[in-house]
Every structure is written in C-alpha cells, then in structure tokens.
Amino acid sequence: MISPQNLAIGAAAVGLAGQEGEIFRRVIGWCLVVLLAMCVIVYLQSADVLC
C-alpha cells in the first residue's frame, strides 16, 4: 500500500512530483485503519467467531 516507488510514480502521473511526503502522510492513516481491520478479522477467525 505504501511502496515508495508507487508513491513516486503516482505523484509524477498526477502532477504532484516532489510532494511524495504529503501523499505518504495522507495514506499512512488509511493503512493503519486497514491493518487494524485485518487484525480484528484474523482474531475473530482464530477465536471461532467467524467460521
């Protein structure tokens, strides 16, 4: 989700070259939300709540 190469290519593609740090700061929050959701799902599956 937060590959530096993908950030650089994406920033260049939309005309935001040089602002990779700003894009990273905006994306990191969403990455943590998705990580937390995945952790909850895995925990629920391991506890036989989701079978």
Image: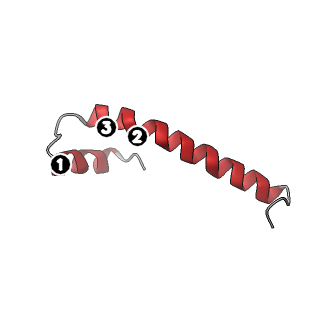
The coloring applied to the image is: secondary structure
Answer with mark 3 or mark 1, whichever residue precedes in sequence: 1
Measuring from the top left, give residue 42's x and y in whole percent. 71, 55
Spatial separation of the CA atoms under disc 3 and disc 1:
12 Å
Which residue in the structure is indicated by mark 2?
27
Q: Which residue is mark 3?
A: 23
Give the total of numbered labels: 3
Q: Is residue 46 left or right of residue 34?
A: right
The amino acid beneath tag 2 is Val
Element on which disc 2 rests: helix
Describe residue 31's horizontal placement relative to residue 49 as left or right.
Answer: left
Q: Quadrant of residue 46?
A: bottom right
Could you say which disc has been placed on residue 14 in the image? 1
Percent of width and height locating residue 22: 30, 32
Mark 3–mark 1 CB contact (< 8 Å): no
**Contact check, label 1 and label 2, Cβ < 8 Å:** no
